[in-house]
Image (tube, grey):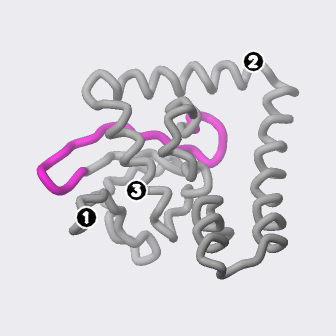
Protein backbone atom coordinates (compact mmCIF):
# COMPACT_ATOMS: atom_id res chain seq x y z
CA UNK A 1 0.00 0.00 0.00
CA UNK A 2 1.32 3.43 -0.95
CA UNK A 3 2.16 5.64 2.00
CA UNK A 4 0.15 8.82 2.51
CA UNK A 5 1.70 12.20 1.67
CA UNK A 6 2.09 12.89 5.43
CA UNK A 7 3.97 9.64 5.89
CA UNK A 8 6.13 10.33 2.84
CA UNK A 9 6.93 13.85 4.06
CA UNK A 10 7.90 12.49 7.49
CA UNK A 11 10.21 9.91 5.88
CA UNK A 12 11.75 12.62 3.69
CA UNK A 13 12.34 14.91 6.69
CA UNK A 14 14.01 12.04 8.59
CA UNK A 15 16.29 11.45 5.58
CA UNK A 16 14.93 7.96 4.85
CA UNK A 17 14.15 8.82 1.21
CA UNK A 18 15.78 11.33 -1.10
CA UNK A 19 14.07 14.21 -2.90
CA UNK A 20 13.73 12.33 -6.21
CA UNK A 21 12.01 9.36 -4.61
CA UNK A 22 9.78 11.67 -2.56
CA UNK A 23 8.73 13.59 -5.66
CA UNK A 24 8.03 10.45 -7.69
CA UNK A 25 5.88 8.98 -4.91
CA UNK A 26 4.01 12.26 -4.47
CA UNK A 27 3.40 12.32 -8.23
CA UNK A 28 1.39 9.11 -7.88
CA UNK A 29 -0.93 10.86 -5.41
CA UNK A 30 -1.15 13.88 -7.68
CA UNK A 31 -2.20 11.73 -10.65
CA UNK A 32 -5.00 10.16 -8.58
CA UNK A 33 -6.24 13.60 -7.53
CA UNK A 34 -6.13 14.86 -11.11
CA UNK A 35 -8.14 11.83 -12.28
CA UNK A 36 -10.87 12.64 -9.72
CA UNK A 37 -10.86 16.30 -10.75
CA UNK A 38 -11.30 15.24 -14.38
CA UNK A 39 -14.23 12.99 -13.38
CA UNK A 40 -15.82 15.95 -11.59
CA UNK A 41 -15.30 18.13 -14.65
CA UNK A 42 -16.90 15.52 -16.91
CA UNK A 43 -19.93 15.13 -14.62
CA UNK A 44 -20.44 18.38 -12.69
CA UNK A 45 -23.92 17.41 -11.49
CA UNK A 46 -22.64 14.25 -9.79
CA UNK A 47 -19.79 16.27 -8.25
CA UNK A 48 -22.24 18.89 -6.98
CA UNK A 49 -24.51 16.21 -5.46
CA UNK A 50 -21.50 14.52 -3.83
CA UNK A 51 -20.42 17.84 -2.29
CA UNK A 52 -23.95 18.64 -1.04
CA UNK A 53 -24.32 15.20 0.58
CA UNK A 54 -20.88 15.50 2.21
CA UNK A 55 -21.65 19.00 3.53
CA UNK A 56 -24.92 17.73 4.97
CA UNK A 57 -23.16 14.83 6.73
CA UNK A 58 -20.55 17.18 8.20
CA UNK A 59 -23.21 19.64 9.35
CA UNK A 60 -24.99 16.82 11.23
CA UNK A 61 -21.74 16.05 13.06
CA UNK A 62 -21.05 19.73 13.75
CA UNK A 63 -24.31 20.03 15.67
CA UNK A 64 -22.81 17.89 18.45
CA UNK A 65 -19.03 18.11 17.93
CA UNK A 66 -16.49 20.80 17.10
CA UNK A 67 -14.61 20.99 13.82
CA UNK A 68 -11.41 20.61 15.87
CA UNK A 69 -12.63 17.27 17.29
CA UNK A 70 -13.67 15.97 13.86
CA UNK A 71 -10.27 16.94 12.42
CA UNK A 72 -8.55 15.26 15.36
CA UNK A 73 -10.43 12.03 14.60
CA UNK A 74 -9.67 12.21 10.88
CA UNK A 75 -6.00 12.90 11.67
CA UNK A 76 -5.82 9.87 13.99
CA UNK A 77 -7.24 7.70 11.21
CA UNK A 78 -4.82 9.16 8.67
CA UNK A 79 -1.86 8.44 10.97
CA UNK A 80 -2.77 4.76 11.30
CA UNK A 81 -0.29 3.16 8.89
CA UNK A 82 -2.68 0.42 7.83
CA UNK A 83 -5.99 2.32 7.71
CA UNK A 84 -7.16 1.61 4.16
CA UNK A 85 -8.51 5.12 3.50
CA UNK A 86 -5.67 7.11 5.10
CA UNK A 87 -4.57 8.50 1.73
CA UNK A 88 -7.85 10.44 1.52
CA UNK A 89 -7.43 11.95 4.99
CA UNK A 90 -3.75 12.94 5.03
CA UNK A 91 -4.38 16.70 5.09
CA UNK A 92 -7.18 16.60 7.71
CA UNK A 93 -5.25 18.73 10.22
CA UNK A 94 -5.13 21.64 7.76
CA UNK A 95 -7.96 24.02 8.74
CA UNK A 96 -8.00 25.59 5.27
CA UNK A 97 -9.34 22.33 3.76
CA UNK A 98 -13.12 22.13 4.31
CA UNK A 99 -14.24 19.13 6.35
CA UNK A 100 -16.67 17.92 3.69
CA UNK A 101 -13.70 17.19 1.39
CA UNK A 102 -12.83 14.13 3.50
CA UNK A 103 -16.24 12.50 3.24
CA UNK A 104 -17.01 10.29 0.25
CA UNK A 105 -20.74 9.73 0.08
CA UNK A 106 -21.17 8.09 -3.33
CA UNK A 107 -17.69 8.11 -4.78
CA UNK A 108 -15.68 4.95 -4.24
CA UNK A 109 -14.27 4.20 -1.79
CA UNK A 110 -17.07 5.41 0.46
CA UNK A 111 -16.21 7.06 3.76
CA UNK A 112 -18.29 8.90 6.29
CA UNK A 113 -18.48 9.24 10.04
CA UNK A 114 -22.00 8.38 11.15
CA UNK A 115 -21.62 9.15 14.85
CA UNK A 116 -19.06 10.01 17.51
CA UNK A 117 -19.18 9.03 21.19
CA UNK A 118 -16.54 10.47 23.49
CA UNK A 119 -15.36 9.39 26.91
CA UNK A 120 -12.48 10.82 28.92
CA UNK A 121 -9.62 9.03 27.14
CA UNK A 122 -11.39 7.18 24.30
CA UNK A 123 -13.50 8.13 21.34
CA UNK A 124 -15.72 5.66 19.55
CA UNK A 125 -16.71 6.44 15.99
CA UNK A 126 -19.25 4.68 13.84
CA UNK A 127 -18.09 4.82 10.22
CA UNK A 128 -19.32 3.63 6.86
CA UNK A 129 -16.62 2.59 4.41
CA UNK A 130 -16.04 0.82 1.08
CA UNK A 131 -18.36 -0.32 -1.68
CA UNK A 132 -20.38 -2.65 0.51
CA UNK A 133 -21.31 0.21 2.83
CA UNK A 134 -19.57 -1.71 5.57
CA UNK A 135 -20.38 -0.10 8.90
CA UNK A 136 -17.78 -0.39 11.63
CA UNK A 137 -17.15 0.93 15.09
CA UNK A 138 -13.61 2.11 15.71
CA UNK A 139 -12.33 2.96 19.16
CA UNK A 140 -9.61 5.61 19.25
CA UNK A 141 -7.63 6.13 22.44
CA UNK A 142 -5.31 8.77 23.81
CA UNK A 143 -1.61 8.05 24.10
CA UNK A 144 0.55 9.32 27.02
CA UNK A 145 1.00 12.63 25.15
CA UNK A 146 -2.81 12.91 24.98
CA UNK A 147 -2.83 12.48 21.18
CA UNK A 148 -5.74 10.55 19.72
CA UNK A 149 -4.54 7.30 18.11
CA UNK A 150 -6.27 4.67 16.00
CA UNK A 151 -5.82 0.93 16.53
CA UNK A 152 -4.02 -1.33 14.08
CA UNK A 153 -6.38 -2.22 11.23
CA UNK A 154 -4.33 -5.07 9.80
CA UNK A 155 -5.43 -7.31 12.64
CA UNK A 156 -9.06 -6.19 12.52
CA UNK A 157 -8.76 -4.33 15.82
CA UNK A 158 -11.23 -1.57 16.45
CA UNK A 159 -13.93 -3.02 14.27
CA UNK A 160 -17.29 -4.29 15.38
Residue 41: x and y in percent read 84, 26
Would residue 74 be visible to someone looking at this image?
A: yes
Query: Is 106 within the magenta?
Result: yes
Residue 79: x and y in percent read 47, 62
Residue 58: x and y in percent read 43, 27
In the image shown, does 19 or 47 lie closer to the viewer? Answer: 19
Would residue 1 be visible to someone looking at this image?
A: no
* Residue behind mark 2: 45
Q: Which mark is residue 145?
A: 1
Read off the magenta span: 104-123
In the image shown, does 105 or 82 lie closer to the viewer? Answer: 82
Marker count (numbered)? 3
Q: Mark 3 or mark 1: which is in front?
A: 1
Residue positioned 25% across, 64% down in the render: 145
Q: Mark 2 or mark 1: which is in front?
A: 1
Query: Between marks 3 and 1, how big is the CA–CA gap?
Result: 13 Å
Residue positioned 55% across, 49% down in the render: 89
Looking at the image, do the residues carrying marks 2 and 1 touch, with CB atoms under 8 Å apart? no
Residue 47: x and y in percent read 71, 25
Residue positioned 53% across, 37% down in the render: 103
Query: Between marks 3 and 2, how big is the CA–CA gap?
Result: 32 Å
Amino acid sequence: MLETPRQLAARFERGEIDRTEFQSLMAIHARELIAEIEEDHQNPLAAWIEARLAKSAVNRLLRKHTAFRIREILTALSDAPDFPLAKYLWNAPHPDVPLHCFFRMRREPLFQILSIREDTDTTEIHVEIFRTRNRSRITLSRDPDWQLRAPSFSKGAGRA
